[in-house]
Amino acid sequence: MNKRDPGAQPERTRLAWRRTVLAATVVGAVTLRYVAVHDAHVMGAALLATLALVWLVLAVMMQRRIKQLAAAKPSPVPVMQPLALTAGLLLFVGISALSIVLS
């Protein structure tokens, strides 16, 4: 009765993670363009560094989750993973707000 669906659910999860990483990539490109056009050097560099860190965390989480889904018996998502993502996103939002206020 507890048999895992080998088809649709893992594929939906994989596609959702890829869309999330693609969206983060687009946000990074738009931010880079904004920094280049408006000469926001110091805060722009901090913002881009934070965005790159968030993107890297998302990419690593995506790869781990896809590997877990490919396994015969997937392990549960560790509690620290969502906390780390939330902390990174809050840091990103904070630096974004600070750069807007200071510019």
Image (cartoon, helix red, strand yellow):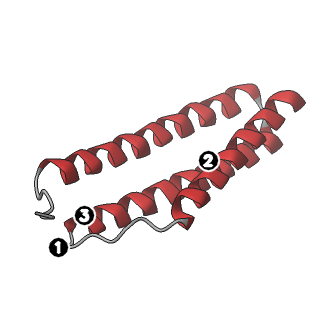
Of label 2 and label 3, which has the lower sequence position? Answer: 2
Name the residue: 60% across, 58% down: 83
Residue type at mark 1 is Ala
* In this picture, residue 23 sits left or right of residue 68: right
| Mark 2 → mark 3, Cα distance in angstroms | 27 Å
Residue nearer the viewer, 18 or 71: 71
Residue situated furthest front in the rendering = 1
Residue type at mark 2 is Leu
Q: Secondary structure at mark 3?
A: helix
| Mark 1 → mark 3, Cα distance in angstroms | 8 Å
Q: Secondary structure at mark 1?
A: loop
> Which residue is denoted by mark 1 in the rendering?
72
In the rendered structure, find residue 51 and report the number of the disc placed on it: 2
Name the residue: 60% across, 31% down: 33
Dot 2 and dot 3 residues touching (CB under 8 Å): no
Looking at the image, residue 36 lies above or below residue 3: above
> Which residue is denoted by mark 3 in the rendering?
69
Residue nearer the viewer, 20 or 86: 86
Name the residue: 64% across, 53% down: 88
Residue nearer the viewer, 41 or 26: 26
